[in-house]
Image (tube, rainbow, N blue to C red):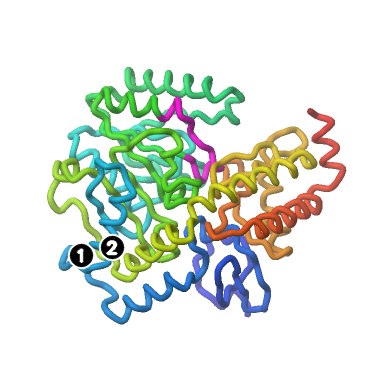
Amino acid sequence: MNDNVHHLSPLLRQSSDILVERAQGMYVYAEDGSKYMDFASGIGVLSTGHCHPRVVEAAKDQIDRVVHAQYAIMKHQPILDLSDRLVELLPDSIDSVFFSNAGTEAVEASIRLARQATGKPNIIAFRGCFHGRTMGSLATTSSSAAVRQGVQPLMGGVVTAPFPDTNWYGISEDEAADFALRELDYILQVQSVPMETAAMLIEPIQGEAGYIPGNTKFMQGLQERCNKHGILLIMDEVQSGNGRSGLMWGYEHFGVEPDVVVSAKGVASGFQLSFMAAPAELMSKALPGSQGGTYGGNAVACAAGLATLDVIRDEKLVDNAADRGKQLVKRLEEVQSRHPEIGNITGRGLMIGTHLVDAHGKPDGDRGAKMLKACEHRGLLMIRCGPWGGNVVRWVPPLIVTAEEIDWAVDQFEAALVETGGGEQNAAIRNTG
């Protein structure tokens, strides 16, 4: 069928040509009969894979009972049960949950809470982090120019501080942490003094920037400064949460406990659900009625969220994410030894980025685009990110992925590297360094 017959916005760019007919587990089946192993998982949404039977059953059962009970009007049991389950998984101080639909809404809610509860105007965000596309969260996003281009000026009161990206700065973790904390102290001195700083908002493992982890020294330094100055520490776990990093929450890698947690994506296996969680005492300091939304906390999505948490627990998917992530990195390092166009391998658990570079060691977004198509032709569905035209091919499969599936995917990826690069480019890279 001619694509011009359809009426989707031309501004929505798609990374594949697939028209999906059905999907199950790790696989997507196209209308033309093609089969693809899905290492994109809806940008990290499908934590339990496509159409997990227990998630589907929970959703179908809830549809028979009630689809939408707007929770500013009435409560429903799934939202009560899910809030209780999430509180069990979060720091002891956090005992109150607000539900919305998308990650950007949860971030907006956290900004609103921070400003109202503290009476302070400013938010410190960190370079490279992605927090959403709505105007408040977008003001705190700096993962790429494309998402901000053409819509400025954005919300005021946001200051951006360095993130300790060791690959970008070319220094050690300790050096990167010291540099970023020193710059943060300078910001607190001259741009956003503590008495005007409501919160620091950060991804513990950056997503759209290319799966760049923070480090323990830096993250603990943030917490120390927040505690000292009465500043809230907000962790954006939209992409790194719900087991994806090999721990339930990304911040757990660094020995910190945030004041506020926001998450979405993998929390409900593809159903639209996000949340912002904080201590009830903190919530009570904001203005009554300041939280809301028509569809937030939808009954079917909450039922799917409960089933998702059950599957993550019962099938030990957090442990699987850790184990398969280590396997994936080991295999990719072997590929890197043969293909130096993989400049860096970053991430934790099952959020891994392979950073592609050209013969001069510069980020290669064109190669990233070619790799996605070459992988697609081999039956492997992947996505990319990164500030340099999408030079990072990312590995974000469902948490149910097996060792055999990891090996198969890496084999296809290496074959795609050979197809899109060839011996001449590889030789050029080696000769330059």
The percent position of residue 271, horizontal first and vertical second, equals: 40, 66
Residue 63 visible, this orientation: yes
Above-or-below relation of 187 to 262 = above
Look at the picture and state if 148 lies above or below 176. Answer: below
In primary-sequence order, the first of circles 1 and 2 is 1
Q: Going by the image, does 351 lie left or right of 56? A: right
Report the residue at 22% width, 24% height from top: 195
Q: Is residue 391 visible?
A: no
Region of the chain picked out in magenta, as a range: 205-219
At 55% from the left edge and 72% from the top edge, which residue is drawn? 24
Verify CB contact (< 8 Å) between mark 1 and mark 2.
yes
Callout 2 secondary element = loop
Q: Quadrant of the C terminus?
A: top right
Q: Does the magenta stretch include residue 135?
A: no
User: Which quadrant would the N terminus be assigned to in this image?
Assistant: bottom right
Question: Is residue 280 found left or right of 105 in the rendered image?
Answer: left
Q: Which mark is residue 71?
A: 1
Label 2 amino acid?
Gly
**Which residue is under mark 2?**
297
**Position of residue 94 measured from the top left corner of the image (x, y, whole percent):** 25, 44
Residue at x 38% of width, y 35% of height? 125
Q: Residue at x 69, y 37 (%)?
A: 343
Give the mark count. Answer: 2
Name the amino acid type tagged 1. Answer: Tyr
